[in-house]
Amino acid sequence: MSSAPGPRVLRDKGGFLSPVVSVVEHEGRPAVLKDYRSKNPVTRNVLAPLLVRREFGVLRHLEGIPGIPRAYAVVEKRALLLEFVDGKTLGKFKAGELPDAVFDRLCETVRAMHRRGVVHLDLRQKKNIVVAGGRPYLVDFANALRGRATAALRAVDESALLKWKQRNFPHLVTGADRAALADHKLLRRFWIFTPRGKSVR
């Protein structure tokens, strides 16, 4: 990995567990570095090696599925080097702006991931689906679970698909989808981990 040009920071939220996310150069091409090396001592020395190894293992297990970025390497046990996806997050597109094929490919990627026994669990986040060249990519597998793709956990990812279908592809929403969305909305009102003051959608 080359150190020139210097890294371009994409995200540095601070906080206890949030890594510094930068674009760096790797083998002559841009790559993403999720880096915990500047965090507090507990995160850096105890949690980071576990988080990095876990996410690296999930991504390597999913390698070859279209729409899943490659994991290149673990750096000094505390950073993860990933394929860079040069696109826009799904939340930045307006309804009807993307072709229907994007949603079809998104569903194919999520279900291929499920067939390999992985659930993402954080696909409702705007930043975690990036569209590049007509292909949606799933990113940030920090909360993903491997080997535990139960029906209940798969339903979390499926509810996210319905959210994006309603928001970005409303003409594709069916009566069954609307009923499922109403059920999900009711369940999320009673979900104890919904941050106070945030709307449930």
Image (tube, rainbow, N blue to C red):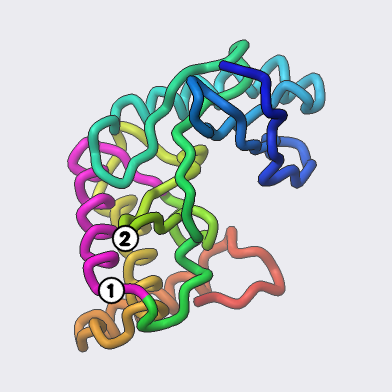
Query: Where is residue 149, by image quadrant?
Result: top left
Q: Main secondary structure of the magenta part?
A: helix
Q: Secondary structure at mark 1?
A: loop
Q: Nearer the viewer, residue 121 or 20?
A: 20
Amino acid residing under circle 2: Gly
Quarter placement of the N terminus: top right
- What percent of the width, then of the height, locates residue 187? 43, 72
* Magenta-colored span: 98-120
Q: Nearer the viewer, residue 56 or 32?
A: 32
38 left or right, relative to 187: right
Amino acid residing under circle 1: Pro
Circle 2 packing at 10 Å, graded few (<14), some (14-19), many (20+), is some
Where does label 2 land, which residue? Answer: 134
183 left or right, relative to 3: left
Q: Residue at x 39, y 79 (%)?
A: 97
- 47 up-or-down from 163: above or below: above
Q: Secondary structure at mark 2?
A: loop
Q: Residue at x 31, y 37 (%)?
A: 148
55 left or right, relative to 133: right
Query: Which tag, 2 or 1, sits closer to the chain's start?
Result: 1
Q: Which mark is residue 99?
A: 1
Q: Which mark is residue 25?
A: none
Label 2 and label 1: CA atoms lie apart by: 8 Å
**2 and 1 marks in contact (CB < 8 Å):** yes
- What percent of the width, then of the height, locates residue 30? 53, 33
Q: Is residue 141 magenta?
A: no
Circle 1 packing at 10 Å, graded few (<14), some (14-19), many (20+), is few
- 188 up-or-down from 53: above or below: below
